[in-house]
Image: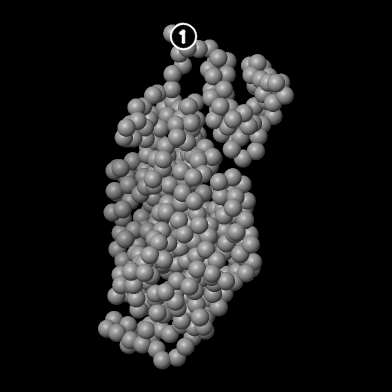
Protein backbone atom coordinates (compact mmCIF):
# COMPACT_ATOMS: atom_id res chain seq x y z
CA UNK A 1 0.00 0.00 0.00
CA UNK A 2 1.41 3.40 -1.04
CA UNK A 3 1.59 5.89 1.82
CA UNK A 4 1.12 9.61 1.27
CA UNK A 5 4.06 10.94 3.27
CA UNK A 6 2.62 14.41 3.72
CA UNK A 7 -0.61 12.97 5.09
CA UNK A 8 1.38 10.57 7.31
CA UNK A 9 3.46 13.48 8.71
CA UNK A 10 0.34 15.59 9.33
CA UNK A 11 -1.61 12.82 11.06
CA UNK A 12 1.28 11.75 13.32
CA UNK A 13 1.98 15.40 14.22
CA UNK A 14 -1.67 15.94 15.16
CA UNK A 15 -1.65 12.81 17.34
CA UNK A 16 1.57 13.51 19.25
CA UNK A 17 0.80 17.21 19.74
CA UNK A 18 -2.81 16.65 20.82
CA UNK A 19 -2.07 16.50 24.56
CA UNK A 20 0.52 17.68 27.08
CA UNK A 21 0.03 14.32 28.79
CA UNK A 22 2.69 12.39 26.90
CA UNK A 23 1.03 9.05 27.61
CA UNK A 24 -2.18 10.18 25.97
CA UNK A 25 -0.26 11.49 22.95
CA UNK A 26 1.76 8.27 22.56
CA UNK A 27 -1.36 6.12 22.79
CA UNK A 28 -3.03 8.09 19.99
CA UNK A 29 0.12 7.84 17.85
CA UNK A 30 0.34 4.09 18.61
CA UNK A 31 -3.19 3.49 17.33
CA UNK A 32 -2.41 5.34 14.10
CA UNK A 33 1.07 3.88 13.50
CA UNK A 34 -0.32 0.34 13.71
CA UNK A 35 -2.06 1.04 10.40
CA UNK A 36 1.33 1.50 8.65
CA UNK A 37 3.87 -0.57 10.61
CA UNK A 38 4.17 -4.09 12.03
CA UNK A 39 3.55 -2.92 15.61
CA UNK A 40 2.67 -4.73 18.83
CA UNK A 41 4.29 -2.45 21.43
CA UNK A 42 5.50 1.15 21.58
CA UNK A 43 7.94 2.64 24.08
CA UNK A 44 8.95 6.22 24.77
CA UNK A 45 12.20 6.36 26.72
CA UNK A 46 14.35 9.17 28.08
CA UNK A 47 18.02 8.91 28.98
CA UNK A 48 18.27 9.79 32.67
CA UNK A 49 21.86 10.96 33.22
CA UNK A 50 21.42 11.14 37.00
CA UNK A 51 20.40 7.48 37.17
CA UNK A 52 22.66 6.33 34.33
CA UNK A 53 19.66 4.49 32.93
CA UNK A 54 16.83 4.45 30.44
CA UNK A 55 13.60 5.69 32.03
CA UNK A 56 10.55 4.37 30.20
CA UNK A 57 7.87 7.04 30.56
CA UNK A 58 5.25 5.60 28.17
CA UNK A 59 4.61 2.00 27.06
CA UNK A 60 1.59 0.54 25.29
CA UNK A 61 0.99 -2.97 24.00
CA UNK A 62 -1.83 -4.43 21.96
CA UNK A 63 -4.53 -5.81 24.23
CA UNK A 64 -2.67 -4.96 27.46
CA UNK A 65 -3.15 -1.19 27.56
CA UNK A 66 -0.56 0.89 29.39
CA UNK A 67 2.20 -0.57 31.60
CA UNK A 68 4.03 1.05 34.49
CA UNK A 69 7.15 3.19 34.12
CA UNK A 70 10.35 1.17 34.01
CA UNK A 71 14.03 1.90 34.59
CA UNK A 72 16.70 0.01 32.61
CA UNK A 73 20.33 0.59 33.80
CA UNK A 74 22.82 1.25 30.99
CA UNK A 75 26.55 0.42 31.00
CA UNK A 76 28.70 3.43 30.15
CA UNK A 77 29.68 2.12 26.68
CA UNK A 78 26.07 1.42 25.73
CA UNK A 79 25.11 4.85 27.06
CA UNK A 80 27.62 6.51 24.71
CA UNK A 81 26.45 4.37 21.79
CA UNK A 82 22.83 5.44 22.39
CA UNK A 83 23.93 9.07 22.40
CA UNK A 84 25.77 8.61 19.10
CA UNK A 85 22.69 7.45 17.17
CA UNK A 86 21.65 9.93 14.49
CA UNK A 87 18.71 8.20 12.78
CA UNK A 88 16.29 5.25 12.97
CA UNK A 89 18.05 2.02 13.97
CA UNK A 90 16.76 -1.51 13.46
CA UNK A 91 17.55 -3.79 16.41
CA UNK A 92 17.34 -7.51 15.79
CA UNK A 93 18.76 -10.18 18.10
CA UNK A 94 19.97 -12.24 15.11
CA UNK A 95 21.94 -9.47 13.42
CA UNK A 96 22.89 -7.14 16.30
CA UNK A 97 26.55 -6.83 17.23
CA UNK A 98 28.75 -4.82 19.59
CA UNK A 99 26.88 -2.23 21.63
CA UNK A 100 23.67 -2.92 19.72
CA UNK A 101 23.87 -6.52 20.89
CA UNK A 102 24.38 -5.38 24.49
CA UNK A 103 21.37 -3.09 24.41
CA UNK A 104 19.30 -5.79 22.68
CA UNK A 105 20.00 -8.03 25.67
CA UNK A 106 19.09 -5.26 28.14
CA UNK A 107 15.69 -4.58 26.56
CA UNK A 108 14.96 -8.30 26.03
CA UNK A 109 14.60 -8.13 22.26
CA UNK A 110 15.13 -11.85 21.65
CA UNK A 111 12.39 -13.21 19.38
CA UNK A 112 11.19 -9.69 18.53
CA UNK A 113 12.13 -6.80 16.24
CA UNK A 114 12.69 -3.21 17.41
CA UNK A 115 12.87 0.01 15.44
CA UNK A 116 14.48 2.77 17.55
CA UNK A 117 14.19 6.45 16.66
CA UNK A 118 16.49 8.88 18.56
CA UNK A 119 14.72 12.15 19.39
CA UNK A 120 16.78 15.34 19.41
CA UNK A 121 16.01 19.01 20.00
CA UNK A 122 18.72 21.44 18.87
CA UNK A 123 21.18 18.55 18.62
CA UNK A 124 20.51 17.46 22.22
CA UNK A 125 19.23 13.90 22.64
CA UNK A 126 16.03 14.08 24.71
CA UNK A 127 14.75 10.53 24.31
CA UNK A 128 14.08 7.48 22.17
CA UNK A 129 10.93 6.20 20.48
CA UNK A 130 10.89 2.42 20.06
CA UNK A 131 8.47 0.38 17.94
CA UNK A 132 8.38 -3.36 18.64
CA UNK A 133 6.89 -6.13 16.52
CA UNK A 134 6.65 -9.72 17.72
CA UNK A 135 8.84 -12.01 15.62
CA UNK A 136 12.24 -11.53 14.04
CA UNK A 137 13.03 -9.60 10.86
CA UNK A 138 9.83 -7.55 10.88
CA UNK A 139 11.40 -4.18 10.04
CA UNK A 140 13.30 -3.06 6.94
CA UNK A 141 14.90 0.14 5.65
CA UNK A 142 11.60 1.34 4.23
CA UNK A 143 10.06 1.34 7.71
CA UNK A 144 13.07 3.22 9.05
CA UNK A 145 12.83 5.91 6.37
CA UNK A 146 9.09 6.38 6.91
CA UNK A 147 9.51 6.72 10.68
CA UNK A 148 12.34 9.21 10.24
CA UNK A 149 10.02 11.86 8.75
CA UNK A 150 8.17 12.22 12.10
CA UNK A 151 11.33 12.60 14.21
CA UNK A 152 10.78 16.33 14.83
CA UNK A 153 7.11 16.10 15.94
CA UNK A 154 7.93 13.32 18.41
CA UNK A 155 11.01 15.15 19.70
CA UNK A 156 9.16 18.44 20.21
CA UNK A 157 6.19 16.70 21.82
CA UNK A 158 8.52 14.90 24.24
CA UNK A 159 10.47 18.07 25.07
CA UNK A 160 7.24 20.02 25.69
CA UNK A 161 5.81 17.23 27.83
CA UNK A 162 8.99 17.02 29.91
CA UNK A 163 8.98 20.80 30.37
CA UNK A 164 5.33 20.67 31.36
CA UNK A 165 6.09 17.92 33.89
CA UNK A 166 8.84 20.09 35.34
CA UNK A 167 6.49 23.08 35.61
CA UNK A 168 3.93 20.91 37.40
CA UNK A 169 6.63 19.57 39.73
CA UNK A 170 7.80 23.07 40.65
CA UNK A 171 4.19 24.17 41.04
CA UNK A 172 3.60 21.33 43.48
CA UNK A 173 6.81 22.21 45.34
CA UNK A 174 5.70 25.84 45.60
CA UNK A 175 2.23 24.82 46.76
CA UNK A 176 3.75 22.51 49.36
CA UNK A 177 6.15 25.23 50.47
CA UNK A 178 3.28 27.71 50.67
CA UNK A 179 1.18 25.31 52.73
CA UNK A 180 4.18 24.61 54.97
CA UNK A 181 4.96 28.29 55.46
CA UNK A 182 1.32 29.07 56.19
CA UNK A 183 1.26 26.28 58.77
CA UNK A 184 4.48 27.62 60.27
CA UNK A 185 3.13 31.16 60.42
CA UNK A 186 -0.27 30.12 61.71
CA UNK A 187 1.36 27.94 64.34
CA UNK A 188 3.07 31.09 65.60
CA UNK A 189 -0.22 32.91 66.11
CA UNK A 190 -1.87 33.36 69.47
CA UNK A 191 -1.18 31.02 72.35
CA UNK A 192 0.85 28.60 70.21
CA UNK A 193 3.82 30.97 70.14
CA UNK A 194 6.55 29.47 72.31
CA UNK A 195 6.43 31.39 75.56
CA UNK A 196 2.95 32.74 74.81
CA UNK A 197 1.70 31.40 78.13
CA UNK A 198 4.85 32.16 80.11
CA UNK A 199 7.57 34.71 79.30
CA UNK A 200 5.57 36.36 76.51
CA UNK A 201 2.23 36.20 78.31
CA UNK A 202 1.83 39.98 78.58
CA UNK A 203 2.95 40.51 74.98
CA UNK A 204 0.40 37.99 73.69
CA UNK A 205 -2.35 39.64 75.70
CA UNK A 206 -1.54 42.90 73.89
CA UNK A 207 -1.51 41.03 70.56
CA UNK A 208 -5.02 39.73 71.27
CA UNK A 209 -6.19 43.26 72.07
CA UNK A 210 -4.78 44.92 68.94
CA UNK A 211 -5.05 42.18 66.28
CA UNK A 212 -8.77 42.69 65.42
CA UNK A 213 -8.19 46.42 64.78
CA UNK A 214 -6.39 48.24 61.95
CA UNK A 215 -4.28 50.73 63.89
CA UNK A 216 -0.51 51.05 63.52
CA UNK A 217 1.55 48.92 65.91
CA UNK A 218 5.16 49.55 66.98
CA UNK A 219 7.21 46.58 68.18
CA UNK A 220 10.26 47.43 70.25
CA UNK A 221 12.94 45.17 71.60
CA UNK A 222 16.53 44.08 71.25
CA UNK A 223 17.77 42.39 68.09
CA UNK A 224 16.85 38.73 67.99
CA UNK A 225 13.94 38.81 70.46
CA UNK A 226 11.36 37.64 67.90
CA UNK A 227 9.65 40.85 66.83
CA UNK A 228 8.90 39.39 63.40
CA UNK A 229 7.16 36.42 65.03
CA UNK A 230 4.92 38.84 66.95
CA UNK A 231 4.18 40.73 63.71
CA UNK A 232 3.18 37.39 62.13
CA UNK A 233 0.87 36.71 65.06
CA UNK A 234 -0.84 40.10 64.76
CA UNK A 235 -1.41 39.71 61.02
CA UNK A 236 -2.68 36.14 61.11
CA UNK A 237 -5.00 36.86 64.03
CA UNK A 238 -6.49 39.87 62.25
CA UNK A 239 -9.33 40.23 59.73
CA UNK A 240 -6.58 40.85 57.14
CA UNK A 241 -5.12 37.36 57.51
CA UNK A 242 -6.20 36.32 53.98
CA UNK A 243 -4.54 39.40 52.46
CA UNK A 244 -0.85 39.84 51.64
CA UNK A 245 1.75 40.12 54.40
CA UNK A 246 4.66 42.13 52.96
CA UNK A 247 7.89 42.29 54.97
CA UNK A 248 10.47 45.02 54.45
CA UNK A 249 13.85 45.31 56.18
CA UNK A 250 14.36 49.06 55.99
CA UNK A 251 18.04 48.71 56.84
CA UNK A 252 18.74 46.30 53.97
CA UNK A 253 17.59 48.56 51.09
CA UNK A 254 20.13 51.12 49.73
CA UNK A 255 19.06 54.70 50.42
CA UNK A 256 18.99 55.48 46.69
CA UNK A 257 16.45 52.72 46.07
CA UNK A 258 14.24 52.84 49.14
CA UNK A 259 11.67 55.31 47.74
CA UNK A 260 11.23 53.21 44.60
CA UNK A 261 11.04 49.95 46.59
CA UNK A 262 8.49 51.20 49.11
CA UNK A 263 6.36 53.54 47.00
CA UNK A 264 7.00 52.38 43.42
CA UNK A 265 7.85 54.51 40.40
CA UNK A 266 6.35 55.64 37.14
CA UNK A 267 7.79 54.80 33.74
CA UNK A 268 10.62 57.21 32.93
CA UNK A 269 10.91 58.50 36.50
CA UNK A 270 14.69 57.95 36.35
CA UNK A 271 17.29 56.26 34.17
CA UNK A 272 16.43 52.57 33.98
CA UNK A 273 12.75 53.00 34.86
CA UNK A 274 11.57 51.43 31.61
CA UNK A 275 8.21 50.38 33.06
CA UNK A 276 6.02 51.46 35.95
CA UNK A 277 6.51 49.56 39.20
CA UNK A 278 4.22 48.98 42.15
CA UNK A 279 5.96 49.48 45.46
CA UNK A 280 5.68 47.38 48.61
CA UNK A 281 2.86 49.53 50.01
CA UNK A 282 0.69 48.94 46.93
CA UNK A 283 1.49 45.22 46.96
CA UNK A 284 0.34 45.06 50.58
CA UNK A 285 -3.14 46.36 49.65
CA UNK A 286 -5.84 44.60 51.65
CA UNK A 287 -3.24 43.18 54.02
CA UNK A 288 -0.35 44.18 56.29
CA UNK A 289 3.08 45.69 55.69
CA UNK A 290 5.78 44.96 58.27
CA UNK A 291 8.52 47.60 58.36
CA UNK A 292 11.42 46.08 60.26
CA UNK A 293 14.29 48.30 61.45
CA UNK A 294 12.14 51.41 60.99
CA UNK A 295 14.85 53.51 62.66
CA UNK A 296 17.04 53.01 59.57
CA UNK A 297 14.66 54.92 57.25
CA UNK A 298 16.34 57.95 55.64
CA UNK A 299 14.69 61.38 56.22
CA UNK A 300 12.95 61.61 52.81
CA UNK A 301 11.37 58.16 53.24
CA UNK A 302 10.25 59.19 56.74
CA UNK A 303 8.29 62.10 55.20
CA UNK A 304 6.62 59.78 52.70
CA UNK A 305 5.79 57.22 55.41
CA UNK A 306 4.19 59.95 57.55
CA UNK A 307 1.82 60.73 54.68
CA UNK A 308 0.90 57.05 54.40
CA UNK A 309 0.07 56.86 58.10
CA UNK A 310 -1.91 60.11 58.03
CA UNK A 311 -3.86 59.76 54.78
CA UNK A 312 -3.39 56.13 53.67
CA UNK A 313 -2.07 57.51 50.38
CA UNK A 314 1.19 57.15 48.50
CA UNK A 315 2.76 58.79 45.48
CA UNK A 316 5.04 56.83 43.20
CA UNK A 317 8.43 58.29 42.38
CA UNK A 318 7.91 60.47 39.30
CA UNK A 319 4.14 60.45 39.78
CA UNK A 320 1.81 63.37 40.32
CA UNK A 321 -1.32 61.67 41.62
CA UNK A 322 -2.06 60.15 45.02
CA UNK A 323 -2.83 56.42 45.17
CA UNK A 324 -5.04 55.19 48.02
CA UNK A 325 -3.77 52.12 49.88
CA UNK A 326 -5.78 49.89 52.23
CA UNK A 327 -3.06 48.61 54.54
CA UNK A 328 -2.12 48.07 58.13
CA UNK A 329 1.37 49.12 59.19
CA UNK A 330 3.39 47.20 61.77
CA UNK A 331 6.80 48.72 62.48
CA UNK A 332 9.66 47.30 64.52
CA UNK A 333 12.95 48.61 65.85
CA UNK A 334 15.74 47.73 68.26
CA UNK A 335 16.71 51.40 68.51
CA UNK A 336 15.55 54.01 71.04
CA UNK A 337 13.47 56.15 68.68
CA UNK A 338 12.76 58.72 71.38
CA UNK A 339 16.48 59.39 71.75
CA UNK A 340 16.82 59.56 67.97
CA UNK A 341 14.10 62.23 67.93
CA UNK A 342 16.01 64.35 70.45
CA UNK A 343 19.12 63.95 68.27
CA UNK A 344 17.15 65.03 65.15
CA UNK A 345 17.75 61.66 63.49
CA UNK A 346 14.06 60.66 63.48
CA UNK A 347 11.02 62.82 62.84
CA UNK A 348 9.06 63.66 65.97
CA UNK A 349 5.69 63.68 64.16
CA UNK A 350 6.42 60.21 62.71
CA UNK A 351 7.39 58.96 66.16
CA UNK A 352 4.04 60.11 67.54
CA UNK A 353 2.20 58.41 64.66
CA UNK A 354 4.04 55.13 65.20
CA UNK A 355 3.89 55.12 68.99
CA UNK A 356 0.10 54.76 69.26
CA UNK A 357 0.24 51.17 70.51
CA UNK A 358 3.80 50.13 71.41
CA UNK A 359 4.55 46.52 72.32
CA UNK A 360 7.87 45.84 74.03
CA UNK A 361 9.20 42.32 73.38
CA UNK A 362 11.34 41.36 76.39
CA UNK A 363 14.85 39.97 75.91
CA UNK A 364 15.42 36.27 76.50
CA UNK A 365 17.38 36.88 79.72
CA UNK A 366 14.16 38.31 81.21
CA UNK A 367 12.10 35.23 80.27
CA UNK A 368 14.48 32.36 80.90
CA UNK A 369 11.57 30.03 81.63
CA UNK A 370 11.09 29.93 77.84
CA UNK A 371 14.62 28.64 77.16
CA UNK A 372 13.84 24.88 77.52
CA UNK A 373 10.83 24.99 75.19
CA UNK A 374 12.67 27.15 72.65
CA UNK A 375 15.68 24.81 72.76
CA UNK A 376 13.54 21.73 72.08
CA UNK A 377 11.72 23.58 69.28
CA UNK A 378 14.98 24.56 67.58
CA UNK A 379 16.42 21.06 67.97
CA UNK A 380 13.37 19.66 66.13
CA UNK A 381 13.35 22.44 63.51
CA UNK A 382 17.08 22.44 62.75
CA UNK A 383 17.26 18.63 62.70
CA UNK A 384 14.60 18.65 60.00
CA UNK A 385 16.44 21.36 58.03
CA UNK A 386 19.78 19.54 58.30
CA UNK A 387 18.29 16.18 57.30
CA UNK A 388 18.79 14.54 60.69
CA UNK A 389 16.14 11.82 60.85
CA UNK A 390 15.99 11.45 64.64
CA UNK A 391 16.66 14.64 66.64
CA UNK A 392 19.22 13.91 69.40
CA UNK A 393 18.23 14.12 73.04
CA UNK A 394 19.39 16.94 75.30
CA UNK A 395 21.80 15.86 78.04
CA UNK A 396 20.73 16.13 81.69
CA UNK A 397 21.89 19.42 83.13
CA UNK A 398 22.26 21.10 79.74
CA UNK A 399 18.95 23.00 79.93
CA UNK A 400 19.82 24.24 83.40
CA UNK A 401 23.09 25.64 82.11
CA UNK A 402 21.37 27.24 79.12
CA UNK A 403 18.95 28.95 81.49
CA UNK A 404 21.85 30.35 83.49
CA UNK A 405 23.39 32.00 80.41
CA UNK A 406 22.75 35.71 79.80
CA UNK A 407 21.79 35.48 76.07
CA UNK A 408 23.03 38.82 74.70
CA UNK A 409 21.89 37.69 71.22
CA UNK A 410 18.46 36.60 72.47
CA UNK A 411 16.39 33.96 70.65
CA UNK A 412 18.44 34.28 67.46
CA UNK A 413 21.60 33.43 69.41
CA UNK A 414 19.90 30.37 70.89
CA UNK A 415 18.75 29.27 67.43
CA UNK A 416 22.28 29.64 66.03
CA UNK A 417 23.75 27.78 69.00
CA UNK A 418 21.40 24.83 68.47
CA UNK A 419 22.24 24.70 64.75
CA UNK A 420 25.98 24.79 65.50
CA UNK A 421 25.61 22.06 68.11
CA UNK A 422 23.73 19.82 65.63
CA UNK A 423 26.36 20.39 62.92
CA UNK A 424 29.13 19.38 65.35
CA UNK A 425 27.09 16.52 66.81
CA UNK A 426 28.79 13.12 66.52
CA UNK A 427 26.42 10.94 68.48
CA UNK A 428 25.15 10.89 72.04
CA UNK A 429 23.25 13.71 73.69
CA UNK A 430 23.47 17.45 73.07
CA UNK A 431 25.51 19.01 75.87
CA UNK A 432 26.04 22.59 74.55
CA UNK A 433 29.56 22.66 75.96
CA UNK A 434 30.62 25.08 73.19
CA UNK A 435 28.48 27.82 74.74
CA UNK A 436 29.94 27.33 78.18
CA UNK A 437 33.52 27.21 76.90
CA UNK A 438 32.95 30.58 75.27
CA UNK A 439 31.70 32.30 78.42
CA UNK A 440 34.11 34.67 80.10
CA UNK A 441 34.63 34.43 83.81
CA UNK A 442 32.66 31.22 84.13
CA UNK A 443 34.22 27.84 84.72
CA UNK A 444 32.60 25.05 82.74
CA UNK A 445 31.43 22.24 84.98
CA UNK A 446 30.42 19.32 82.79
CA UNK A 447 27.57 17.19 84.06
CA UNK A 448 28.92 14.37 86.19
CA UNK A 449 27.39 11.07 87.07
CA UNK A 450 29.43 10.61 90.21
CA UNK A 451 28.28 10.85 93.79
CA UNK A 452 30.62 10.34 96.74
CA UNK A 453 33.29 9.01 94.39
CA UNK A 454 31.13 6.15 93.05
CA UNK A 455 29.06 5.73 89.88
CA UNK A 456 25.36 6.53 89.97
CA UNK A 457 22.76 4.03 88.84
CA UNK A 458 19.94 5.29 86.59
CA UNK A 459 17.42 5.91 89.41
CA UNK A 460 19.98 7.84 91.43
CA UNK A 461 20.92 10.01 88.43
CA UNK A 462 17.25 10.67 87.67
CA UNK A 463 16.49 11.52 91.29
CA UNK A 464 19.44 13.92 91.45
CA UNK A 465 18.38 15.70 88.26
CA UNK A 466 14.72 16.03 89.30
CA UNK A 467 15.84 17.45 92.67
CA UNK A 468 17.94 20.06 90.85
CA UNK A 469 15.06 21.10 88.62
CA UNK A 470 12.65 21.26 91.56
CA UNK A 471 15.15 23.53 93.29
CA UNK A 472 15.12 25.82 90.24
CA UNK A 473 11.31 25.97 90.20
CA UNK A 474 11.01 26.23 94.00
CA UNK A 475 9.00 23.02 94.08
CA UNK A 476 6.55 23.99 91.32
CA UNK A 477 5.64 20.93 89.21
CA UNK A 478 3.00 21.94 86.67
CA UNK A 479 2.11 25.11 84.77
CA UNK A 480 4.38 27.70 83.13
CA UNK A 481 7.91 27.55 84.50
CA UNK A 482 7.14 24.33 86.38
CA UNK A 483 9.47 21.32 86.60
CA UNK A 484 7.38 19.29 84.15
CA UNK A 485 7.76 22.03 81.50
CA UNK A 486 11.54 22.23 82.04
CA UNK A 487 11.87 18.45 81.85
CA UNK A 488 9.61 18.18 78.83
CA UNK A 489 7.23 15.61 80.29
CA UNK A 490 3.61 15.44 81.43
CA UNK A 491 3.12 16.62 85.05
CA UNK A 492 1.36 13.32 85.96
CA UNK A 493 4.30 11.38 84.51
CA UNK A 494 6.69 13.46 86.62
CA UNK A 495 4.66 12.85 89.79
CA UNK A 496 4.64 9.12 89.02
CA UNK A 497 8.42 9.06 88.72
CA UNK A 498 8.82 11.11 91.89
CA UNK A 499 6.61 8.64 93.77
CA UNK A 500 8.71 5.75 92.47
CA UNK A 501 11.97 7.48 93.43
CA UNK A 502 10.66 8.58 96.84
CA UNK A 503 10.92 12.32 96.10
CA UNK A 504 8.47 14.21 98.29
CA UNK A 505 6.40 17.07 96.95
CA UNK A 506 3.40 19.23 97.89
CA UNK A 507 1.51 17.98 100.96
CA UNK A 508 3.60 14.84 101.18
CA UNK A 509 6.65 16.99 101.77
CA UNK A 510 4.97 18.61 104.75
Q: Measured from the top left, where is residue 486 in percent x and y?
A: 56, 34
- 375 versus 353 height, above or below: above
User: Which residue occupies the foreground of this view, 181 or 214?
Assistant: 214
Residue at image position (51%, 83%) is 311
What secondary structure is marked by label 1? loop
Could one spot residue 269 in this view of the protein?
A: yes
Does any portion of residue 131 appear in the rendered image?
Answer: no
On the image, the x and y values in percent for residue 368 come to 50, 40
In the picture of the structure, the residue carrying the numbered disc 1 is 452
Q: Residue at x 41, y 40 (%)?
A: 406
Quadrant occupied by the C terminus: top right
Residue visible at 49% across and 83% down in the picture: 313
Image side of residue 462 versus residue 226, left or right: right
The outermost residue toward the right is 507
* Residue 436 position in % (x across, y down): 36, 32
Q: What residue is at 32 percent from the left and 87 percent from the top?
A: 268
Check the image and report above or below for 274 versus 449: below
Q: Give the farthest residue toward the bottom.
A: 320
Question: Is 417 located above or below residue 315 in the figure?
Answer: above
Number of numbered discs on residues: 1
Q: Nearer the viewer, residue 298 or 338?
A: 338
Decide: few, some or many residues near mark 1? Use Cα within 10 Å; few <14, some 14-19, many ≥20.
few
Depth order, front residue of 128/494: 494
**Res 146 → quadrant:** bottom left
Amino acid sequence: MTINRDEFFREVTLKVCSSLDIRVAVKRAFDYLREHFPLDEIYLDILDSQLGAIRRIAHFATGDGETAEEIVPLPEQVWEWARSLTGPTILDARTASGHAKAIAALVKIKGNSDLALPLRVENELVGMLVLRAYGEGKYDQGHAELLSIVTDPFALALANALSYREVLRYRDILLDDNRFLNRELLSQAGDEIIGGNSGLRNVMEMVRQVAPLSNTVLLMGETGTGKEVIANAIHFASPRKDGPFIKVNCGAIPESLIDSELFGHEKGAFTGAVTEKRGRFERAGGGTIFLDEIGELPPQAQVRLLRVLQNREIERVGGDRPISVDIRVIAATHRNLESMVSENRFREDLWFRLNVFPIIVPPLRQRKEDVPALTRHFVELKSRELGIAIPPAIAPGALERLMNYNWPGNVRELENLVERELIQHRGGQLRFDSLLLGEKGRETQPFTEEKSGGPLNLDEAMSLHIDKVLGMTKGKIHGPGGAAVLLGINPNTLRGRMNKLGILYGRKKG
